[in-house]
Image (cartoon, rainbow, N blue to C red):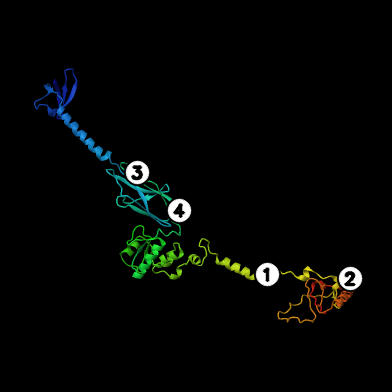
């Protein structure tokens, strides 16, 4: 196709061409002949290059396929979370290496019970973490969230329950410098309580057992804040049937700080589920039991108070108290008073009443009847005289002897 155009203006970079119907076309001046000036007429041939067009289309399709295979087919994989170990207050979690494919990593975060627990540092290198400070015998829900340039991916939720105090399967012991007999004894004790032994210090190591604080593994345990205890700690856990505190089992700790705990009662046949009785309550119960006979003796009923004697049985020879006399309680009887011999007069004391009935086991029944009859007549005379003859004798101790 041939087109004739008139050059209107020529600049350093662009030339203005005019068509036959007076339309303006900007055309690169570098493509025009060098002798062109304003008013010149140029012929331009226009044709389609199909071969070049097909080649470019083929190249573009290959690029699209390459991009699809690289970024469209393979995508990042969601993290796979597992529980490596659990104790009474901590959990060790691990996961497979992160697969990003061609995406770029943004972050990897751990969530606990729906709240963000923290971000994992260096997620392409670290594949495990330890969460401490948990409650005993409590269930927690964990999951990971991976953020990439291709999107966000979450792992499956993992339910983990911390152990009870009597569950020793979560203990992982790393032995340090130990004599051969102690190492053998430690191995047997660990197997009996259901714990595990790791020859090197790992993230799930709970205790480092040794008798001397030296060595590379000891330094590593100190850097990771792992408790360094003596072998007696494992024996204490086995003896008590529960995890015991490490305060008294450090290398430089005083052995007197070791608390035997309720396991001693278990060995004696006392159930470990029942809490021990406080010493204060034990002493109070013992004291109450020891004072019980004394209180019973003090509260014992007085036969004379319950069964007061009749007025007709008063002794005729009993002296009457004067109305104005002041009498007080006599001193208590001596503790070392010898026992009364048979046939001797008996003595009876009354605290609240002056009316006392006195009998002697040696008197015959007939003589006792006559004595009662005479006493009854004398009592009638006393009652006719009035209460002034008794005076204050009702509030005094009276001794009457036959």
Q: Position of residue 402 (x, y in %)?
A: 83, 79
Callout 4–callout 3 Cβ contact below 8 Å: no
Q: Position of residue 222 (x, y in %)?
A: 35, 63
Q: Position of residue 153 (x, y in %)?
A: 34, 43
Q: CA distance from mark 2 to mark 1?
A: 40 Å
Foreground mark, 4 or 3? Answer: 4
Residue at which label 4 appears: 138
Q: Position of residue 288 (x, y in %)?
A: 63, 68
Residue at which label 1 appears: 295
Classify 167 as above or below 155. below
Q: CA distance from mark 4 to mark 1?
A: 52 Å
Q: Residue at x 67, y 71 (%)?
A: 294
Q: Which numbered disc, 1 or 3, marks the residue that appears first in the sequence?
A: 3
Callout 2–callout 3 Cβ contact below 8 Å: no
> From this viewpoint, which residue is outermost toward the front?
365
Q: Secondary structure at mark 1?
A: helix
Q: Quadrant of residue 362?
A: bottom right
Q: CA distance from mark 1 to mark 3?
A: 79 Å
Please indicate whether residue 155 sits to the left or right of residue 15 in the image.
Answer: right
Q: Quarter holding the N terminus?
A: top left
């Amino acid at each position: 196709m041939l087109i004739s155009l008139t050059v209107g203006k020529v600049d350093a970079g662009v030339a203005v061409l005019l068509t036959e119907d007076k339309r303006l076309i900007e055309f690169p001046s570098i493509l025009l002949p060098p002798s062109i000036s304003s008013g010149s007429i140029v012929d331009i041939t226009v044709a389609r290059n199909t071969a070049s067009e097909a080649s470019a289309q083929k190249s573009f399709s290959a690029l699209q396929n390459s991009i699809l295979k690289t970024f469209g087919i393979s995508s990042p994989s969601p993290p796979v979370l597992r529980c490596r170990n659990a104790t009474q207050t901590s959990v060790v979690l691990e996961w497979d290496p992160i697969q990003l494919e061609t995406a770029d990593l943004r972050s990897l975060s751990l969530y606990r019970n729906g709240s963000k627990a923290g971000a994992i540092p260096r997620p392409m290198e670290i594949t495990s973490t330890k969460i401490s400070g948990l409650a005993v015998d409590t269930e927690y829900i964990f999951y990971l969230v991976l953020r990439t340039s291709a999107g966000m991916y979450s792992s499956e939720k993992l339910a983990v329950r911390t152990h009870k105090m009597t569950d020793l399967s979560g203990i992982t012991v790393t032995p340090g410098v130990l004599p051969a007999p102690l190492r053998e004894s430690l191995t047997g004790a660990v197997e009996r309580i259901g714990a595990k032994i790791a020859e090197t210090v790992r993230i799930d190591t709970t205790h480092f057992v040794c008798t001397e604080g030296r060595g590379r593994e000891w330094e590593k345990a100190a850097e990771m804040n792992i408790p360094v205890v003596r072998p007696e700690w494992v024996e204490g856990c086995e003896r008590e049937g529960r995890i015991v505190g490490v305060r008294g089992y450090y290398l430089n700790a005083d052995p007197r700080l070791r608390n035997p705990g309720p396991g001693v009662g278990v060995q004696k046949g006392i159930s470990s589920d029942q809490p021990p009785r406080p010493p204060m309550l034990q002493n109070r119960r013992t004291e109450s039991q020891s004072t019980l006979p004394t209180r019973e003796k003090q509260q014992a009923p007085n036969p004379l108070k319950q069964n007061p004697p009749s007025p007709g049985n008063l002794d005729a020879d009993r002296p009457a108290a004067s109305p104005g006399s002041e009498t007080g309680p006599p001193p208590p009887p001596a503790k070392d008073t010898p026992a009364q011999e048979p046939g001797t007069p008996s003595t009876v004391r009354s605290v609240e009443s002056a009316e006392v009935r006195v009998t002697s086991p040696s008197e015959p029944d007939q003589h006792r009847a006559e004595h009662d009859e005479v006493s009854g007549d004398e009592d009638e005379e006393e009652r006719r005289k009035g209460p002034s003859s008794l005076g204050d004798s009702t509030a005094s101790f009276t001794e009457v002897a036959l």
